[in-house]
Amino acid sequence: MNRAPDGFRQAERDLAAARHAAGAGFHEWVAYGAQHGAEEALKALVEHLGGSLRGRSLTAILQRLG
């Protein structure tokens, strides 16, 4: 089952939460939400392209994408 659309939706929610945190001045949560959103989007892209992976390293995910 391809869960890429779910991953992309989660990435959008994470980034929306980061924007909300920014407006409230919670900058440490902005960094967390933005990083997590990027992670979710990249994982969804890998899955969309037919791959799968585990882990949270943006560098490792980007290397996998080539």
Image (spheres, rainbow, N blue to C red):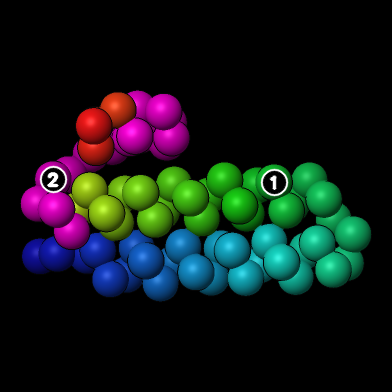
Judged from the image, the secondary structure of the residue bearing numbered disc 1 is: helix
Quadrant hosting residue 66: top left
* Residue displayed at 53% across by 49% down: 36
Residue 54 location (% of width, % of height)? 28, 37
Asked if 15 appears above or below 51 in the picture, the reply is below
Q: Residue at x 17, y 44 (%)?
A: 52
Residue at image point 68% right, 61% down:
18
Say which mark, if any, is on residue 14.
none
Q: Nearer the viewer, residue 6 or 62?
A: 62
Residue hosting label 1: 31
Instruction: Report helix, strand or loop for mark 2.
Output: loop
Q: Residues within 10 Å of mark 1 (few under 14, many from 20)?
A: some
Report if residue 42 lies within the magenta region. Answer: no
Q: Is residue 4 left or right of residue 32?
A: left
Identify which amino acid the numbered label 2 is placed on.
Gly
Q: Is 17 on the left or on the right of 12, as rendered?
A: right
Residue that lies at the very extreme toward the right in this rendered image: 25
Task: Locate residue 36 relative to residue 42 in the image: left or right.
Answer: right
What percent of the width, then of the height, locates residue 24?
88, 67
Q: CA distance from mark 2 to mark 1?
A: 27 Å
Identify the amino acid type marked 1. Ala
Bounds of the magenta segment: 48-62
What secondary structure is the stretch in magenta mostly built from? Answer: loop
Q: CB of mark 2 within 8 Å of CB of mark 1?
A: no
Q: Residues within 10 Å of mark 2 (few under 14, many from 20)?
A: few
Q: Position of residue 32 (x, y in %)?
A: 65, 47
The question of residue 60 being in magenta is answered with yes
Q: Which residue is mark 2?
A: 51
Residue in the image at 34% along x and 63% along y: 7
Q: Earlier in the sequence, mark 2 or mark 1?
A: 1
